[in-house]
Image (cartoon, helix red, strand yellow):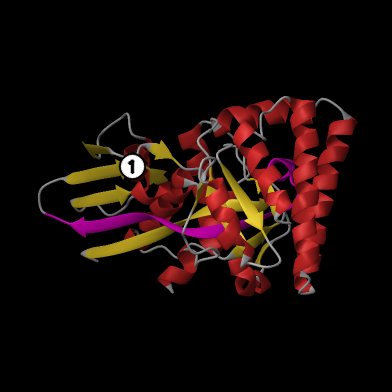
Amino acid sequence: MNRFDLIVPGKFFLLGEFSVLEKFPAIVGTIGRYTKISYHEQSQTRHIICKYGKKTESFFIDNKDSEIAKYLVQNLNDKKNFELVIDSNEMFDQNKKLGLGSSASVASGIIELINILNGSDFSLQSKINLAKDFHNNMQQAQGSGADIAGIFYGGATLIAQSECSKILMLNKYRDHFRVITTPAAKITSHAIRQFQSWANESDKNKSLLAQMGNTTNAAVDAIHQSNLSGFIDKISEFSELLKRLEMSSGIEIFTTHHQEIERIAAKYNVAYKPCGGGGDIGVMAALDPKIFTELEPKLNSLGKVLKSDLFVKGISDLLA
């Protein structure tokens, strides 16, 4: 294969962030912001170019400081020379990294690249496991892998211990949701370590996490019954549980931007919650999507509503 291109979507947590780290379910959605990976054979060197924000890094595959280069050296059977371009610019706003899983998309794309170049036939679950391990190594943390699974499956995905499954019913409701970015962001790996220490402190903390898991399951039941109102109610309920987790653990989840967005959204009967451990993005859900036309201009000073399709195809569908 002389040349091919991959596009890997970003992700956001609809429900289940933090509690998924303790093996409770989560719902992950994809967003039409992509990491683009281009491979082509060439005669001279094995060369890698990474683009992110306003920065561009260029290095050869023997670069010992690059986790990507080291992983390719260790796992790539094909010894042909190539140029590999990894472009994550859509996951950034200028130089600001958005909390859309850019590193998870890169890790997922690298695993798919190796799968193709080696002529392997990895199962979907094997690719998810490999990408999760690679991503954790890149991040120097032990994440749940929920974002990885969501990226591979695409659309809206229920991440559970027994199996992952697509929630196809959410596709017809995609216009009822919006993702918004805010200026404040946290280092996700720090939040994960702080959470893991808190989660093991007491049975009371475990009980709160179980409530979060039950809320996620109830949301899935609602959407399977085409009960959008019930699903949105569970987003609001999960948001309240996140506030309790924040107060108990000390992890900052509801920054001042999130608090103000939530206050304004409530005036329009729109549910709102932050997403994931990074702190900079949130998701809104409304029974009447027309309300966003009036609501979105009110949020300009607090964040940026992303004009991107939600619940887009994952890697597996894009390659089919």
* Identity of the residue furthest to the left in this view: 44
Residue 88 visible in the displayed image = no
Magenta range is: 17-42
Residue located at (65% from left, 39% from top):
260
Residue 52: percent from left, percent from top: 33, 42
In the rendered image, the vertical position of residue 218 relative to residue 243, given as above or below: below
Q: Quadrant of the C terminus?
A: bottom left
Q: Quadrant of the N terminus?
A: bottom left
Residue 3's quadrant in the figure? bottom left
Kind of residue at badge 1: Tyr
Residue 86: percent from left, percent from top: 31, 49
Residue 72: percent from left, percent from top: 34, 45
Residue located at (80% from left, 74% from top):
225
Q: Which residue is mark 1?
A: 52
In the rendered image, the vertical position of residue 120 relative to residue 109, given as above or below: below
Residue 208's quadrant in the figure? top right
Q: Is residue 36 magenta?
A: yes
Position of 279 with respect to 317 (left or right) is right
Residue 258: percent from left, percent from top: 63, 39
